[in-house]
Amino acid sequence: AQRVTQPEKLLSVFKGAPVELKCNYSYSGSPELFWYVQYSRQRLQLLLRHISRESIKGFTADLNKGETSFHLKKPFAQEEDSAMYYCALRGSGYSTLTFGKGTMLLVSP
Amino acid sequence: DVKVTQSSRYLVKRTGEKVFLECVQDMDHENMFWYRQDPGLGLRLIYFSYDVKMKEKGDIPEGYSVSREKKERFSLILESASTNQTSMYLCASSRRGDRGFFGPGTRLTVL
């Protein structure tokens, strides 16, 4: 069985502070990991995926197989980063995504 | 740009009614999915389809059925709506092995 855990329901930071949204997973094979973001009144959209190894809107995430983690990081949070963030996993050979419960990020001025 | 559309943004139905939620994608994607999104529970997969007329149960299929008669359209059916099916319903589509694209969601309220 595959599982994604996001331990924080809410993360509140001030503008300019570093941000780390935690994601841990459970999967026996080689997973593909994603971060999706949903801004207020917008549809869910892909933020980044681990195989791309890219930085989007200043966010990065590194897959740590030893710790089974895929934490999302940004060195300096902006108010426009306020949104709901979901970590998701796709098992090898599967089409479906398993999502975590989400973390709401609030960035205050 | 991929477009996934859902027939309604808001829907209000009564307990016991049959409800149809429609989803259409315009990028010839093989895979289509229905999720429900609830606060504190994240997204949970109801059903998915990897080809026309093919369907697979997700994590919470009870009380739902689906139909995929054409590649671009995936319908979610609530045979007899109940109040615990009040939720945000998200449709998504993808190519095999590729990222998922989501629709805007349908907020269903069952009274």
Image (cartoon, helix red, strand yellow):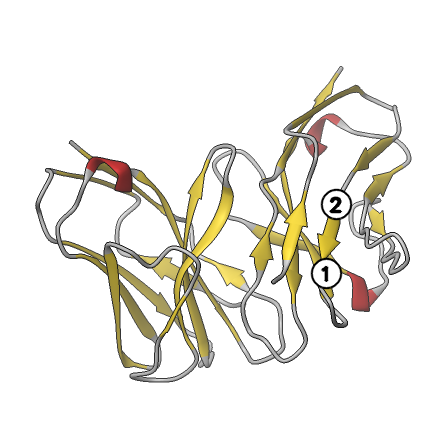
Q: Which residue is mark 2?
A: A23
Name the residue: 21% across, 35% down. Answer: B83
Horizontal placement of A32 versus A42: left or right?
right
Name the residue: 12% across, 50% down. Answer: B80
Q: Nearer the viewer, residue B12 or A56?
A: B12
Q: Which of the numbered marks, if any, corresponds to residue A33?
A: 1
Amino acid type of the residue that numbered disc 1 sits on in the rendered structure: Leu
Name the residue: 77% across, 40% down. Answer: A22
Q: Secondary structure at mark 1?
A: strand
- Pointers 2 and 1 within a single chain: yes
Horizontal placement of B3 versus B97: left or right?
left
Q: Which of the numbered marks, if any, corresponds to residue B77?
A: none
Q: Position of residue A60 (x, y in %)?
A: 85, 49
Q: Chain of mark 2?
A: A
Q: Are marks 2 and 1 in contact (CB under 8 Å)?
A: yes
Q: Position of residue A9 (x, y in %)?
A: 63, 29
